[in-house]
Image (tube, helix red, strand yellow):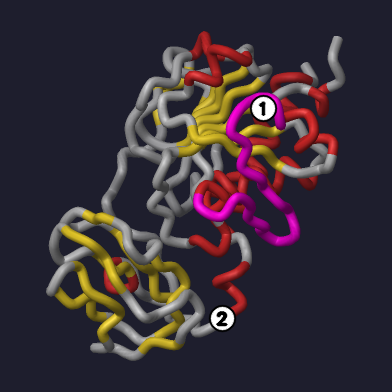
Amino acid sequence: MKPLKERTIIMKGAGEMASGIACRLHRSGFYHLLMLETSFPLAVRREVSFCEAVHDGQKAVEGIEAVRIDDGAGLSQTWETGRIALMVDPKGDTVRRMQPDILIDATIAKRNLGTAIADAPLVIALGPGFTAGTDCHVVVETNRGHNLGRLITAGQAEPNTGIPGNIGGFTSERVLRAPASGLFTTGKTIGDPIVKGECIGQVGTEAVVAAIDGILRGLIRPGSQVTTGLKIGDIDPRGEAAYCHSVSEKARALGGSVLEAILAAYNR
């Protein structure tokens, strides 16, 4: 049998949570990892999201580098150099073509966008929208709280609450949302200090205004087309600029849970 760490892993999604999981797997020696993304990902915490490689060709998160490849020809070379491979494949056609050993759905879409339990010998899905035993083998709980990271082998994760996690005593107040549909523009960058009432940017002619003081921990890519209510930024009231460039505690926890699911499945 193929050694565990040589098994091929495909991950749907390369945003903040997916990237935290990928970092944990990579540090644990799983180097045969391919991440799939859309052609214009809308990540907010871009400094810790491998999906930025879609735009820039490469992206490093905590010293681990992901590289965009346009087809399977560059896959082996990318892995041999210790880097994570990333492809634009919003429909997941690569899953059917490559038939990976492990499939991880980390899109955090709150619904199943096409993942099936037959896609791989081990299918792991994160968050609500999946039923373990039907859509996948394991569901990972993503809701903050006592059960964060719990592995579910029968049933579903907790329903989406729609309330952002509490950081520094703030929940919804720390999230910046599009006040209208249109083109997002800004002169701010991730890591900038922010004060309550400050204009962060505009969607068309509508201003995006901060509701609290803090550090701009995340901001959607300028020039993105957004829809009303879309999350486009994140203010961290703790005021630590270093947090902008490191994987969050939630993403690390989910990464540990995915690692546990893999080890549990293959070490029986």
- Which residue lies at the image location 47% right of the left edge and 24% below the top edge? 92
In the rendered image, residue 72 lying in the magenta stretch gets the answer: yes
- The quadrant of the rendering that contains the C terminus is top right
Question: Which mark is on residue 241?
Answer: 2
- Which residue lies at the image location 38% right of the left edge and 62% below the top edge? 220
Q: Provide the residue span drawn in magenta.
A: 55-74
Helix, strand or loop at mark 1:
strand
Q: Which residue is mark 1?
A: 9
Residue density around tag 1, few if under 14, some if 14–19, many if 20 or more, within 10 Å? many
Whether residue 16 is visible here, answered yes or no, is no
Does residue 120 lie above or below 8 as drawn?
above
In the rendered image, residue 68 lying in the magenta stretch gets the answer: yes
* Left-right relation of 9 to 94: right
Does residue 120 lie above or below 73 as drawn?
above
Type of residue at label 2? Ala
Is 158 in front, or is 91?
Answer: 91
